[in-house]
Image: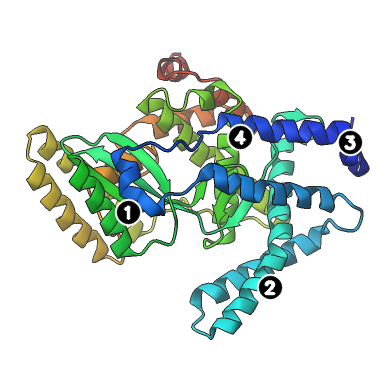
């Protein structure tokens, strides 16, 4: 049965919505203050996920309820106009060298639009998810698509010195200067014989999910879809077992990239009624980056296996300079860089076959929804390998 908009104000349905929110918050990793080296290194730059959620979640759901009042929800054409205006304001703020009063006015205008723009993106992704026959509960796609546009936090990741192995990670505040990043990394490395990197992220699977609004619109849709998939898979074996092994983490992140890009593209096209240009065709420069980064990882691992840590670190720095000479802007390449970015199977910093295996699995699924549901039932790397082997057997 299709729920009427006014039914959302029934006490029964409000309780159900609150239950959904509570479940998501409970399942997500809590903020627990521990005196670990990574926490000591982050110091005042630590980012509280729970604090962030309790600050923005009520605001988001008040707007969702408000939007159900007749006349408050933007029309199809208004959604596109709102999004365009919002991104233009974001662009003006980012490149502006004007006086503070002008920046304040631009930020004010942007805040006025933000909630309706978020709702426009959320509804497009929700409709696409419904069309792909994904989970619907009480008339809603479950869990509801919920995003917060803005500047995402950063992340500090750590690795062993003699192996490209991720040992820890912690979310830190965003907008850190290069010197602040250097200070955090140096603090960790003074406390522990490891490698540290403060890196950027495009989004974070909180609830609502944090999505960077500094990217182009297609990337925003892809990131929002990626983060929603993480929340979706939390209620299935795939997400619940994300942290059980390195391979399961990589399957989760890589599947979210593959399916998120496709879901985001479909959602974008449904809202803007145009076929988006594909971004899978590598330019000559991009091909250089992939090949060089793959070779850098390979040689680095060879150095480390031979016990030549200093040689490996000197080599990574030389490769960073080489890559940046082609127009890139990589601040640091070290063991932590490869340990973290290598967790994403489609990254040039990775050396896993999981990406190509997931692509093969996607090709054997009739639809995007079929792929998302099929992969959601994976609870171990052994089960995943069996599925891939079954595809290859005649």
Whether residue 65 is visible to the viewer of this picture, yes or no, is yes
The residue tagged 3 is 3
Q: Is residue 266 left or right of residue 39?
A: right
Q: Quadrant of residue 340?
A: top left
Quarter of the picture containing the C terminus is: top left
Instruction: Please tell me which of labels 2 and 4 falls first in the chain.
Output: 4
Instruction: Please tell me which of labels 1 and 4 falls first in the chain.
Output: 4
Q: Nearer the viewer, mark 1 or mark 3?
A: 3
Q: Is residue 80 above or below residue 300?
A: below
> Residue 111 placed where, x, y %?
67, 66
Residue count near mark 3 (Cα–Cα under 10 Å), binned few <14, some 14–19, many ≥20: few
Q: Is residue 168 above or below residue 210?
A: above
Image marks 2 and 4: residues in contact by CB distance under 8 Å: no
In what element is the residue under mark 2?
helix
Q: Is residue 35 left or right of residue 263?
A: left
Image marks 1 and 4: residues in contact by CB distance under 8 Å: no
The residue tagged 2 is 109
Identify the residue at horizontal 55%, vertical 72% (top origin). 91
> Marks 2 and 1, how far apart in space?
40 Å
> Marks 1 and 4, how far apart in space?
41 Å
Kindly identify which numbered label has been placed on residue 287: 1
């Amino acid at each position: 049965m299709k729920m009427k908009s006014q039914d959302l104000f029934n006490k029964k349905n409000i309780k159900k919505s609150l239950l959904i929110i509570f479940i998501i918050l409970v399942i997500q990793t809590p903020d627990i203050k521990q005196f670990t080296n990574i926490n000591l290194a982050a110091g005042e730059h630590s980012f509280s996920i729970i604090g962030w959620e309790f600050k923005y979640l009520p605001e988001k759901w008040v707007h969702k309820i408000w939007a159900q009042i007749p006349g408050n929800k933007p029309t199809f054409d208004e959604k596109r106009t709102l999004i365009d205006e919002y991104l233009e304001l974001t662009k003006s703020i980012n490149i502006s060298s004007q006086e503070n009063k002008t920046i304040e006015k631009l930020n004010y205008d942007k805040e006025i639009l933000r909630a309706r723009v978020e709702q426009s993106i959320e509804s497009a992704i929700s409709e696409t998810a419904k069309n792909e026959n994904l989970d619907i509960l009480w008339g809603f796609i479950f869990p509801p698509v919920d995003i917060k546009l803005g500047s995402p936090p950063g992340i500090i990741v750590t690795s062993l010195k003699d192996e490209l192995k991720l040992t820890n990670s912690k979310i830190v505040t965003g907008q850190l200067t290069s010197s602040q990043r250097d200070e955090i990394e140096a603090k960790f490395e003074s406390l522990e014989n490891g490698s540290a990197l403060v890196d950027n992220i495009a989004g974070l699977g909180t609830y609502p999910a944090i999505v960077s609004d500094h990217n182009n619109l297609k990337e925003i849709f892809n990131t929002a879809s990626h983060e929603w998939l993480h929340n979706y898979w939390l209620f299935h074996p795939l997400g619940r077992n994300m942290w059980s092994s390195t391979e399961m983490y990589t399957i989760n992140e890589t599947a979210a990239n593959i399916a998120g890009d496709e879901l985001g593209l479909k959602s974008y096209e449904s809202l803007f009624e145009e076929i988006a240009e594909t971004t899978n065709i590598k330019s000559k420069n991009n091909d250089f980056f992939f090949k060089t980064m793959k070779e850098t990882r390979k040689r680095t691992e060879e150095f480390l296996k031979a016990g030549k840590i200093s040689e490996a670190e000197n080599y990574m720095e030389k490769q960073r300079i080489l890559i940046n000479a082609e127009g890139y802007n990589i601040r640091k390449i070290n063991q932590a860089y490869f340990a973290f970015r290598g967790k994403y199977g489609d990254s040039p910093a990775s050396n896993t076959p999981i990406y190509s295996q997931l692509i093969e699995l996607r090709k054997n699924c009739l639809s995007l929804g079929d792929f998302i549901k099929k992969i959601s039932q994976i609870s171990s790397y052994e089960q995943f390998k069996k599925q891939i082997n079954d595809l290859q057997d005649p």
